[in-house]
């Protein structure tokens, strides 16, 4: 079970870290991608574009290093649920938009049901890690 | 015990998010196209974005039968001359400015459908945006499946250079 948790952590952390790196290359394009959902106000798209890659990088690094695992897993689960909801909304609206998941890697970022499936897999991994043993900070209490 | 554990998870979450925000600000400052340095310009660009719909070929068939819709083909000149949607205007993805200027009067106030090859989805979306913003189209859409979808549905096609 410990090995499975370790693999799940590496996988989830690796994916979030890769996504963060791809977005951080061109944060402006990422912000425009968020705006193309027409789901949040313009100012929010700009600020999300600036800060979300950092949050993804931090939680990815935490999962890869095995520190603050449950906090990072909770953050990953919340983000994955949010991404899945946003893409589902865009699909239902019949919008033509790029998901922006992996920045300019356009072949991977065409929004659609495959994107939603990937988000649900990430959500599953996050919830699985969240259900494990408390991290060092919780054990200290 | 459970409450302490839950508190621990939220404390970890707080640290991760806080670290992430600091990391985000640092990364944004480090890259050339950083958002925070010139956020007002970006805000202006975001403000003018319009929703682009994605239509199925079947829906387009209905629209062509019942409503006036202008079809714009963004593929290459060679591809256009070979075969294109009947009555389609040509505005090249590779060099859209001349086409936008030439056809602005035919697009203004109309619903516009942009046709592309399947690998040109991003260019199709960008041109659809520009047709609304710069040429005054009422609304713009792209076609699911692009040019292939158009042909598969048996929608009308022409040859030659009627809309160049």
Image (cartoon, rainbow, N blue to C red):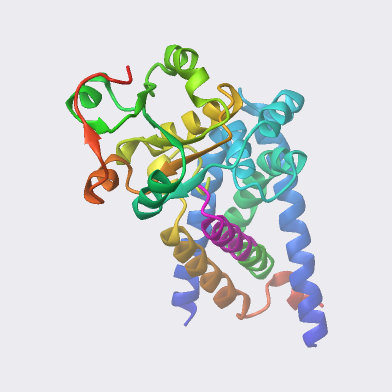
Magenta stretch contains residue B82: no
Task: Give residue B141's position: percent from left, percent from top.
Answer: 48, 41
Q: Nearer the viewer, residue B133 or B62?
A: B62
Question: Which residue is more in the foreground, A14 or A6?
Answer: A14
Give the quarter of the image for residue A44.
top right
Give the residue furthest to the front: B66
Q: For the point 56% across and 30% down, which residue is it? A: B137
- B53 vs B95, left or right, is right
Is residue B1 among the parts visible in the rendering? yes
Residue at 55% x, 22% y: name it: B135
Q: Position of residue B163 (x, y in %)?
A: 33, 20
B139 shown above or below A10: above
In x, y percent, where is residue B9? 74, 72
Q: Which residues are magenta?
A: A79-97
Residue A110 seen in this snapshot? no
Magenta stretch secondary structure, dominant: helix
Above or below for A29 versus B149: above
Q: In which quarter of the view is residue B139 placed?
A: top right
User: What is the count of numbered marks?
Assistant: 0
Q: Is residue A80 magenta?
A: yes
- The one nearer the camera, A49 or A32, is A32
- Horizontal side of B106 relative to B88 (left or right) equals right
Quadrant including the N terminus of chain B: bottom right
In the image, taking residue B108 as reference, residue B11 lies left or right, namely right
Q: Is residue B135 left or right of residue B16?
A: left
The image shows residue B101 at horizontal and vertical percentages of 49, 13
Q: At x 22% / y 50%, what residue is drawn?
A: B152
Quadrant for the C terminus of chain B in the image: top left
Question: Residue B72 or A81: which is nearer the viewer?
Answer: B72
């Amino acid at each position: 079970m410990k090995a499975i948790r370790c693999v799940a952590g590496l996988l989830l952390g690796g994916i979030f870290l890769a996504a963060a790196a791809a977005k951080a290359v061109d944060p402006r394009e990422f912000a425009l991608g968020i705006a193309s959902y027409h789901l949040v106000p313009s100012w929010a798209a700009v600020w999300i574009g600036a800060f979300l890659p950092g949050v993804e990088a931090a939680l990815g690094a935490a999962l890869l290093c095995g520190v603050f695992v449950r906090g990072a897993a909770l953050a990953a689960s919340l983000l994955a649920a949010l991404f899945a909801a946003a893409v589902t909304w865009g699909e239902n609206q019949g919008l033509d938009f790029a998901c922006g998941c992996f920045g300019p890697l356009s072949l991977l970022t065409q929004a659609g049901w495959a994107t939603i499936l990937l988000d649900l897999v990430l959500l599953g991994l996050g919830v699985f890690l969240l259900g494990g043993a408390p991290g060092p900070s919780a054990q200290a209490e | 015990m459970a409450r302490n554990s839950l508190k621990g998870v939220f404390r970890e979450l707080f640290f991760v998010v806080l670290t992430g925000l600091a990391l985000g600000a640092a990364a944004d400052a480090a890259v050339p196209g950083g958002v925070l340095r010139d956020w007002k310009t970006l805000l202006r660009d975001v403000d003018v974005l319009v929703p682009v719909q994605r239509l199925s070929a079947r829906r387009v068939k209905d629209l062509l039968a019942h409503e006036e819709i202008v079809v714009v083909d963004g593929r290459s000149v060679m591809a256009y001359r070979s075969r294109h949607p009947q009555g389609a205007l040509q505005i090249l993805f590779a060099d859209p400015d001349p086409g936008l200027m030439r056809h602005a009067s035919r697009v203004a106030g109309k619903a516009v459908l942009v046709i592309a090859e399947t690998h040109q989805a991003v260019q199709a979306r960008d041109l659809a945006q520009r047709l609304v913003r710069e040429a005054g189209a009422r609304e713009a859409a792209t076609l699911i499946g692009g040019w292939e979808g158009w042909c598969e549905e048996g929608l009308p096609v022409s040859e030659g250079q009627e809309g160049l």
